[in-house]
Amino acid sequence: MVGKPGRRGTCETDATSRDGDDHPAALGRRPGDMARMATQDDVRRIALSLPETSEGEDRFAFSVRNKDKDKGFAWSWMERVEPKQPRIENLDVLAVRVANAVEKEMLLASDPEMFFTEPHYNGFPAILIRLEAIGADELEELLTDAWRCQAPRSLVREFDQRDGA
């Protein structure tokens, strides 16, 4: 569940892995209740604090190395502004991996002002987050969970041991 960063063992993939009861949005916390909204600097600081994370060279994106491949867990939204034209990077929106379709639907239903999706992400375990609508603490929880979905299990175990989970 989204709770304290670094507290889940790995990214769960079954439908019962997250009920969302302790997710701040599920608790009725609204974007206006947060003291400070997240920025790109917050995204970078949080993402790069996670073990073996790297930032993309050609765009605002973060990945973790897993079996000799970089596995993306957060990236800027490439928005289709004009039909049949190339997508344009929208730095105000962050795409973030989630564990499964159940988690995705729970987050989308919890706060449509903060979380949304588009047809491009149908069937893919990721949500889109409006940075102006999320606080840095909640963003840290989501990014840590996203990292867990992509990181090797051994690295997640090491992270949990170091973090005192």
Image: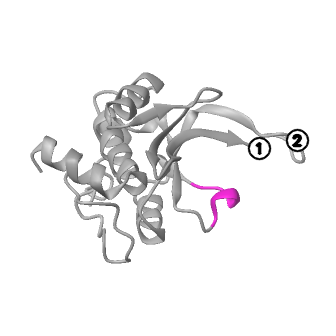
Q: Which residue position holds label 1?
A: 80
Is 91 on the left-hand or right-hand side of 89? left
Look at label 1 and name its amino acid. Arg
Expressed as whole percent of the image width and height from the top left, the position of residue 80 reads: 77, 44
Name, please, the residue furthest toward the front: 68
Can residue 29 be seen?
A: yes
Quick check: marks 2 and 1 in contact, CB under 8 Å?
yes
- As for residue 153 lying within the magenta part, the answer is no
Q: Please state the extent of the stretch shown in magenta in the rendering.
A: 117-122
Name the image colouring. Answer: one colour
Name, please, the residue furthest toward the right: 84
Expressed as whole percent of the image width and height from the top left, the position of residue 14 reads: 37, 76
Mark 1 Cα shell of 10 Å, populated few (<14), some (14-19), many (≥20): some
148 up-or-down from 61: above or below: below
Look at label 2 and name its amino acid. Gln
Q: Which residue position holds label 2?
A: 85
